[in-house]
Image (cartoon, rainbow, N blue to C red):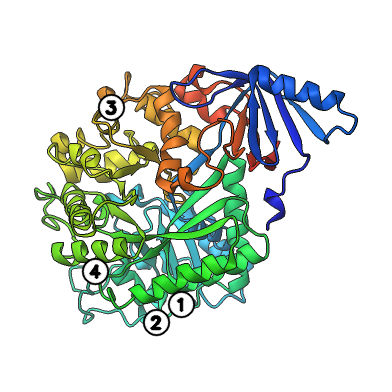
Amino acid sequence: MSELIAPDPALTFFIGGTAWLGAGVPEATAVLVSEGRIAALDDDARELMHQNLLSPTPATFEVVDLDGGFLMPSFGEGHAHPLFGGLEENGPSVRACTSIAEIVAEVRRYAEKHPQKEWIIGASYDGSLTPGGLFDARWLDEALSDRPVMLRAWDYHTVWCNSLALERAGIDANTPEPKLGEIPRRADGSPLGILREWGAIELLTTVSPGFSFDEQIDALRRATKHFAELGVTWVQDAWVEPADVVVYLEAARRGALSTRVNLALLADPRHFPASLPAMIEARRQVELLGHPLLTANSVKFFADGVVENETGALLEPYCSGLHGHGMLVWTAEHLADSVTAIDAAGFQAHIHAIGDAAVRRALDAIELARRVNGPADRRPVIAHVQLAAADDLPRFKELDVIAVMQPLWAQMDALMTVLTVPRLGLERTDRQYQMRTLVETGATLAFGSDWPCSSASPLEGIGIAVSRATIDGEPAGGWMPEQRLDAETALAAYTSGVASQAGAARTQAPWGEIRVGASADLVWLARDPRTVCPTELPLTGIRATYLAGAPTFQR
């Protein structure tokens, strides 16, 4: 058992602030934690502490003065990629670059500092820095031409590389378009320098050395520590391949995890259902380890790509007309049969669906699994739900589907204005991320960040969910103001919503709310986020994070 969840002292008494127990529940002013669980609230908590002090053999205890702050259930992370995020520190620092010239300079600097590296691999650059997100290999050649360079974009559905990397991968004018991928080309047919979607990206990743096993362990250590610093205690890793499972198992053994992590094992349509037995074995290996912070209960499906690449699957064509309706990764029958198969095997379906055609196909697949396999506590997930047809929104409630959305994306930032709006047009632009509509249908809404595609901070996401405006307050009143959430609903999506996704209620010590008997998964904020201006929420200080009563972060 990890030392992170061995609670010490035996009793922790929180007092001197507001304890938010969950949406619609009266607040408390005192919380007592015993052996990692919520033992009592308010007067009951005070009385138990008093009795302990009068006991001839009092239990060890700590009093935490909240100093007027705000204690609440810790945040959950409904959809992220911890390994990708942690590995960003193992390459050139291009995320903060605001121009092509800055990226080129940073790649050159990093390469000069690391002459021993055979490949320069990094992430993640801003895809909106060029029209249409089209980046040329020759620009990276200016930084480095004698070693391969491979950079992932923010969306992690695109890679930009230099000419030598293309050569090492055997990609030239005669290379056919890969299945489930695209190679943008110049007028003469030669590859431009970017690869879209995993079928194309694999041409590079299969010839590149990647990162060492220990580098990946350290990446998970950094990533889960980062989440703990942001008040998060449970993370859904939404893209786990077989080699990643081995990394997670060893990270757990080494005590490298600061949060609970559930693995979603990737289902590749080119290899499924043949890969299902290996998924079942991977889950068995995780269960055999028996580590309290690691589970492998989900299977990840990509129903489509992303709008910025025009690979998100739409019911009506893209306005720019480069790719018609986008890319559906699975045929309707194959996806439905595969979701039914993993559901029968006891896995939770976790389906990436960006466009309205993909959302419909995902719902259809879940509906078939429900009909074929009968009643079960399955909690299927559709992640992102950027665009959904009006007729499909009520189906989330009807089919008990959890919508795991990324609130930070629901703003008119450069990604939206430069890459998304021109592709969708104004009418579809104003039908994106219909969070309030889903809540009003009675569906379960959970939040995630998709980190490192965007910030992992729940407070940043909550600020956007409440305001639907950029950090500069644009547009006034918010974009699609009818889809704004009140603060408690947004907090619930990042707490009890994710707990519902995780099946926390089925565990011996449920989390996601503060009630007697629940696991003491808590976050202490300096201020009440319900009373803070949305644009200032990211500045709300996190004082401490507790997992089963033990601090995983303290400021």
Q: Amino acid at mark 4?
A: Leu
Kindly identify which residue carries mark 2. 168
Q: Position of residue 539 (x, y in %)?
A: 56, 28
Q: Nearer the viewer, residue 274 or 225?
A: 274
Q: What is the quadrant of residue 374 in the picture?
A: bottom left
Q: CA distance from mark 4 to mark 2?
A: 21 Å
Classify residue 478 as left or right of residue 524. Answer: left
Residue neighbourhood size for the residue with mark 2, other residues' Cα within 10 Å, grouped as few (<14), some (14–19), many (≥20): some
Q: Amino acid at mark 2?
A: Arg
Local secondary structure at mark 4: loop
Q: Position of residue 44 (x, y in %)?
A: 67, 21
Residue neighbourhood size for the residue with mark 3, other residues' Cα within 10 Å, grouped as few (<14), some (14–19), many (≥20): many
Kindly identify which residue carries mark 3. 483
The disc, 1 or 4, on the residue closer to the chain's N-terminal end is 4
Q: CA distance from mark 3 to mark 2?
A: 48 Å
Are dots 1 and 4 in contact, CB under 8 Å?
no
Classify residue 93 as left or right of residue 312. Answer: right
Local secondary structure at mark 2: helix
Look at discs 4 and 2 and give the one toward the viewer: 4
Which residue: 54% across, 23% down?
20
Residue neighbourhood size for the residue with mark 4, other residues' Cα within 10 Å, grouped as few (<14), some (14–19), many (≥20): many
Q: CA distance from mark 2 to mark 1?
A: 9 Å
Kindly identify which residue carries mark 1. 208
Which residue: 29% across, 63% down?
344
Look at discs 3 and 4 and give the one toward the viewer: 3
Q: How many marks?
A: 4
Are dots 3 and 4 in contact, CB under 8 Å?
no
Local secondary structure at mark 3: helix
